[in-house]
Image: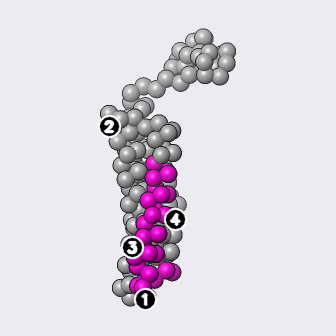
Amino acid sequence: MDTNDVQRGCEPDDTAGGAGAERLSLSEHDRAAIHLRASKGLVRALVAQTVMLGAAILVCGLVSGAAAAWSALIGGGAYLIPNGLFALRLLAGLWGPVTSTPFTFFVGEAFKLGAAVLTLGLAAWLGSGWIVWPALLVGLLCVLKGYVLLLLFRRLP
């Protein structure tokens, strides 16, 4: 280990990538800055998705009436609600006593997809007489593409 490694906070680690591989050590200040940036990114994504869902509900309601507005709400909510719960779990892993692992991430993604499919299936089964399918799909797509607002306003983390 040379003096540059000590100044950067790196130590050789034989287990990570073979002989001579370096392991990065972060200070508590650096960790807090990374957690804050990740938290802001999660919250911004949820806000953008919520704004896009609101716009979809408004447009569908104005164009096609109340049934279309409700359909857009169901379509967007099918993804926004599980996504919000997953984001809360990730935020708890950043700031709370529980830790998030890659396994937690994959379980959360599976939960989001399963909940969305279940909600859409229930909508098809229970609301077959009044669901406006184009509006439902518009609501779902607007939530799925909520990051477009972040791109538009250059607020991606």
Residue type beneath disc 4: Lys
Foreground pick, 57 / 12:
57
Name the residue at the right extreme: 19
What mark, if any, has residue 32 been given in the picture? none
Estimate how packed mark 3 is, as few (under 14), some (14 to 19) or many (20 or more) residues with alpha carbons within 10 Å.
many
The numbered mark, 4 or 2, whose residue comes first in the sequence reads 2
Q: Which residue is mark 4?
A: 145
Foreground pick, 5 / 22:
22
Q: Specify the quadrant of the image occupied by residue 84.
A: bottom left
Quick check: can you spot residue 48?
no
| Residue range (magenta) | 108-134
* Marks 2,3: beta carbons within 8 A: no
Q: Which residue is mark 1?
A: 64
Query: Is 111 colored magenta in this rendering?
Result: yes
Residue type beneath disc 3: Leu
Q: Which residue is mark 2?
A: 96
SS for callout 1: helix
Vertical placement of residue 100 versus 51, above or below? above
Q: Specify the quadrant of the image occupied by residue 98.
A: top left
User: Gap between marks 2 and 3, in whole Å?
Assistant: 31 Å
Q: Which residue is mark 3?
A: 73
Q: Position of residue 126 (x, y in %)?
A: 40, 76
The numbered mark, 1 or 2, whose residue comes first in the sequence reads 1
- Nearest to the eye among marks 2 and 3: give it: 3
The numbered mark, 1 or 4, whose residue comes first in the sequence reads 1
